[in-house]
Amino acid sequence: MEHHLIPTQSIRYHAPVWVCVLLTLLLILLPTGYEDNVVFQESDIQPALVLQTDESSIVDTGLVRSGEQRCQLEILGGAFKGQTVTGTNALNGSLEQDKIFASGDKALVRINYQDNQVLSVSMIDHYRMPWEILLGALFVLLLILFAGKTGIRAVLSFVLTVLMIWKVLVPLYLKDWNPIWVGLAMTLVLTVLIIALVYGFDQRCAAAVSGSALGILVTCGMGILFTDLFQIHGAVMSYSESLLYAGYQDLNLTRIFMASIFIGASGAIMDLSVDITSAVHEVVEKRPDLSWWEAARSGMNVGRAAMGTMTTTLLFAYSGGYVALLMVFMAQGTPLSNIFNYKYVAAEIIHTVIGSFGLVTVAPFTALCAGLFLSRKQETSASSDSIPQQQAPASVPQSNP
């Protein structure tokens, strides 16, 4: 029996890796349908080295800079590699969007050409790709050195999540599929695969996935309800209006905002469900005689301790990007009643509080599911181990006549 049990456990543990690898390869090959966008068909985007700059056409009015910066550039790639051209960097008077280049910088430029002749070169932004690759490589290296094989699984789940968002979620949103159903489907599929990478396809995976799914559904329902009650329009999302002006007027931005609520909280929900499931599993392993309710109570105690920090984690995650806005409110002496009624603040309140609701509910859900699934497993194995002992014939002493 042990010879059959070990390979089965090994298959269950390694099967999620192969599923995720195959799905990752499929997503890499899967076209989004937007590769042939006409915006970039008659131009070539390449990195370029800034040789000299000319700021004589820039007009400074305090903090605002307008006009045009001219740069002498050496193109570093593509059909025009090695050529020296003049690029223009238009300034719109916005510190958020404008950029200034200096000699020695690397810039990403758009080369407009015709018949192999450069017509004009516009500066897009600083060229950051090498540093981004370096940062990602350091992250992967540290993760693998610290966690070993588990780190490789974590990297695989990270890559799979990025591909699911870019190759599935975003294209379907642009095609005006229902954002709520698409977001739920993608989140639940990723929940199963990511948790399976931790445990394999076993009882712990079933318990953690069940608790996470219930918590995500609660977050989804409350997000829809309170977005309507708060009368929040999806245009509060950054760059959302640009979509409408780009020809996607039929997109339901409010539903996309609703979907972003439970998608944003799903990571923390999965984290908490895995913590509780692991704790219950350890308790049941040490005390296989515990009933499912006693095991579930142990999981709830772990969940109570974790919730105190997890809800604060969401607060930091969502409010960190709005420090400048809060500083503006304080600098202007804005009353608190005005602050809380401001739509951007109300939108972040929804993200934070509704996400925290999901965390609060996922703790008892996961504890109950873990207690039910894992204790049944132990009770079944304990009862099966006791059967041969009960059926074993007892030795009967021989009596002399």
Image: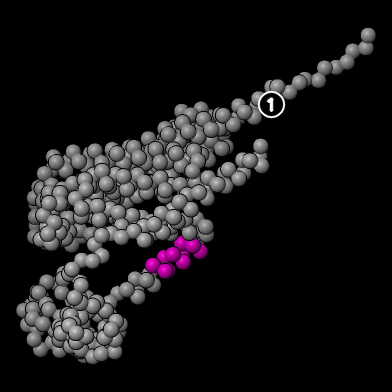
Residue at 49% x, 43% y is 201
Q: How far across and how far down the image is residue 281, in percent?
A: 51, 39
Q: Quadrant of residue 125?
A: bottom left
Q: Is residue 150 left or right of residue 133?
A: right
Q: Badge 1: how crowded within 10 Å, few (<14), some, or many (20+)?
A: few
Q: Nearer the viewer, residue 181 or 290?
A: 181
Q: Is residue 50 left or right of residue 199?
A: left
- Indicate whether 29 appears above or below 133: above
- Indicate whether 30 appears above or below 252: below
Q: Which residues are magenta?
A: 136-145
| Count of labels in the image | 1
Q: Amino acid at mark 1?
A: Pro
Q: Quadrant of residue 381?
A: top right
Q: Could you tell me if residue 237 is visible in this image? A: yes
Please name the predominant secondary structure of the magenta segment in the image.
helix
Residue at 33% x, 39% y is 215
SS class of the residue under badge 1?
helix
Q: Quadrant of residue 96?
A: bottom left
Q: Residue furthest right?
A: 401
Q: Could you tell me if residue 360 is visible in this image? A: no
Q: How far across and how far down the image is residue 364, in percent?
A: 37, 35
Residue matched to label 1: 388
Q: Nearer the viewer, residue 367 or 190?
A: 190
Q: Is residue 211 left or right of residue 292?
A: left
Q: Image quadrant for the C terminus? A: top right
Residue at 66% x, 37% y is 1
